[in-house]
């Protein structure tokens, strides 16, 4: 079970013995998908309210989805064992090292 990851300067990291690499360039579709998944979800007046635990679960889910949409071969399921803090650290790294995606990752850094 994964408890954390360390991303090298070139964007490579390992989860449960499987190597992954955060590319330096992304297609327009990948950038769009990443931006959409990273957008904060506003509360809808009169809609369902989430408590803090539910909001953290929702946030972790979208962070996993966003990472999986830009990292070749990475599956959402592979990230399920990572705590929210590790997912946020991954997106902080992306914001600092991948200019095409940095604006989308800012709400989470």
Image: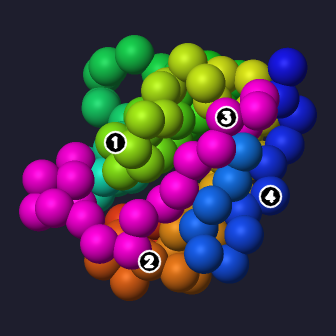
| Label 3 SS | strand
Q: Residues within 10 Å of mark 2 (few under 14, many from 20)?
A: some
Where is mark 3, residue-wise?
18
Distance, label 1 to label 2, CA atoms, is 14 Å
Residue occupying the point 67% across, 34% down: 18
**Which mark lies nearer to you, 4 or 3?**
3
Residue 14 locus on image (x, y percent): 72, 45
Report the magenta residues as a range.
Answer: 15-33
**Quarter of the image where the N terminus is located:** top right
Distance, label 4 to label 3, CA atoms, is 13 Å
Check whether the beta carbons of the residues at disc 2 and disc 4 lie within 8 A of each other: no
Check whether the beta carbons of the residues at disc 1 and disc 2 lie within 8 A of each other: no
| Label 4 SS | loop
Residue 17 locus on image (x, y percent): 76, 33
Marking on residue 55:
none
Distance, label 2 to label 3, CA atoms, is 22 Å
| Labels 1 and 3: the sequence-earlier one | 3
Where is mark 1, residue-wise?
69
Check whether the beta carbons of the residues at disc 4 and disc 3 lie within 8 A of each other: no
Q: Residues within 10 Å of mark 4 (few under 14, many from 20)?
A: some
What's the coloring here?
A: rainbow
Where is mark 2, residue-wise?
98
Label count reads 4
Quadrant of the rendered image containing residue 31: bottom left
**8 or 77: nearer the eye?**
8
């Amino acid at each position: 079970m994964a408890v954390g990851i360390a991303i090298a300067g070139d964007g490579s990291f390992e989860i449960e013995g499987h190597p992954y690499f955060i590319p330096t360039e992304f297609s327009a579709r990948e950038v769009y998908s990443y931006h959409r998944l990273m957008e904060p979800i506003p509360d809808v007046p009169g809609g369902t309210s989430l408590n803090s635990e539910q909001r953290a679960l929702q946030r972790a889910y979208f962070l996993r989805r966003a990472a999986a949409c830009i990292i070749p071969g990475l599956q959402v399921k592979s990230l399920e064992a990572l705590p929210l803090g590790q997912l946020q650290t991954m997106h902080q790294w992306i914001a600092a090292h991948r200019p095409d995606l940095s604006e989308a990752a800012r709400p989470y850094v």
